[in-house]
Amino acid sequence: MRPEVCFDASMLAEAFRMAAENPINRNRGSCIQQEVGAMGEIAFAACFTNDWRQHQILKNVGMPDFDGNIEVKASGFPFLENLNLKVRDEYAIREVKRLREDGFTGSDLIYVQIIIDTSARIPEEIKAGTRAVICGWADHAHVMATPPKAERNRHGGLLGYDSRSIPISQLRAMEEFPIPRRA
């Protein structure tokens, strides 16, 4: 069974505040994509540290989301077993170079997939009581072993970047996470 985090009003308020303080300039799939990203980091902090307030959202700008080598990938979507962990190809290549400069090895980069279980495919709002499903994780080598694929929008048009994709059913369980949980 996958770990889950249920968002209360204070967690949502923090996610929305953090997203507003840390705007990201990129393609957006929904009007609340940045908030979903912040929610993913809060959910990971809740699972990893037992205190959602231990998120590192404003401390990690331009770096992986947690401890310098954990990248939280969050998607707002109705939870389904056939969803995927997706990593932009240029991000994976850039981050492993940066990690090596910081003394990590490429395999030290860990991606954690979190699905913010929404009622709509393109959510426009998220309410208290929404759950986050921590689907599992993959290391950098596992991600890079998958072929890059051109990403397309809903209408079939190219988005201008490639991603690597791993079905969540093939991710490693959080019980096997290589970094000990903090209490």
Image (tube, helix red, strand yellow):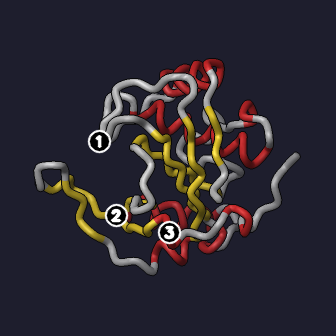
Which of pointers 1 and 3 indicates the residue nearer the eye? 3
Distance CA(mark 1)–CA(mark 3): 26 Å
Q: What x and y, as percent, mark residue 113?
A: 53, 55
Determine whether 39 is above or below 154 in the image: above
x, y percent for residue 142: 52, 76
SS for dot 3: helix
Residue wearing tag 1: 27
Say which residue label 2 marks. 163
| Along the viewing direction, whichever of 25 and 169 lies nearer the viewer | 169
Kindly identify the amino acid type of the residue bearing the numbered disc 1: Asn
Left or right of 69: which side holds 36?
left
Neighbour tally class for label 3: few under 14, some 14-19, many 20 plus, Cα within 10 Å: some
Name the residue: 72% across, 40% down: 46
Q: Secondary structure at mark 1?
A: loop
* Cα–Cα span, label 2 and label 3: 18 Å
Position of 149 compared to 64: left or right?
Answer: left
Looking at the image, the residue that sits furthest to the right is: 183
Residue 122, numbered label: none
Of all residues, the one furthest to the bottom in this rendering is 145
Which residue is rendered at x = 56% and y = 42% of the image? 132
Whole-Å distance between the Cαs marked 2 and 1? 13 Å
> What amino acid does circle 3 point to?
Ser
Which is nearer the eye, 48 or 149?
A: 48
